[in-house]
Amino acid sequence: GVDYSVQMFKTASKNNPNKARYHFLNEDITTLHFSDLEKFDCVTAINSLFLLSNTKSMLNVIRNNLNKRGLLIIVSPKPTGSFYQFVRASFHEKPFIIKLKAILRAFINVHHIINSLNLQRKLDELNKKNIINYTTLEEMCNNLTKVGFRIIRTTEIQANQNWLILATPTN
């Protein structure tokens, strides 16, 4: 795996269940070049593409470093997601005991929830200023198609807050 974030790299390396098989690099993937023998079977881009200034360039790098039968898994925030929708979907039509357990867990993790809300607020502000770029599903699929991917599946996940997109190279 490759991650630009030092903290994410450390976490992935620490929690690696099979150090002989899985390797992690703390690098900028756009500067890496792999030989045909070092291509990836699967690439995941989780909550990261919207942070890039040139998403198409990154998708092109991924396609060039993915095996012909490889899989790209993207999880990306929807431009229209909101914390309110997430909470509503989390508690809607669930038995009372499940709602109660979730509420109690939320109180236990209140510090994490507050940090998440603050981060989401900051990301929303950056999106409004066009510093980051949340894309619609149509935009993301168009970008993937333009750089040589075939879309296998798209769906909404995590209380309709994120897109899940599965794609494979067309060549």
Image (cartoon, helix red, strand yellow):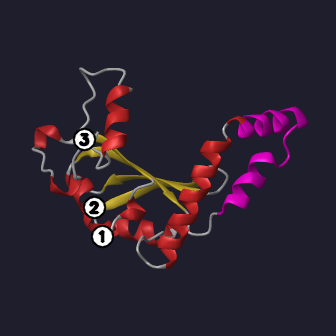
Q: Is residue 14 magenta?
A: no
Q: Quadrant of residue 6?
A: top left
Kindly identify the amino acid type of the residue bearing the numbered disc 3: Phe
**Nearer the observer, 104 or 92:** 104
Describe residue 85's horizontal placement relative to residue 96 as left or right. Answer: left
Residue 162 in the image: above or below residue 146: above
Over which residues does the magenta segment extend? 82-107
Q: Which quarter of the rendering shows the C terminus? A: bottom left
First along the sequence among labels 3 and 2 = 3
- Which is in the foreground here, disc 3 or disc 2? 2
Kindly identify the amino acid type of the residue bearing the numbered disc 1: Asn
**Nearer the observer, 73 or 51:** 51
First along the sequence among labels 3 and 1 = 3
Q: Helix, strand or loop at disc 2?
A: helix
**Residue 40 - label:** 3
Q: Is residue 96 magenta?
A: yes
- Near mark 3 (Cα within 10 A), the count class, few <14, some 14-19 or many ≥20, is many
Residue that protrudes farthest toward the right in the picture? 96
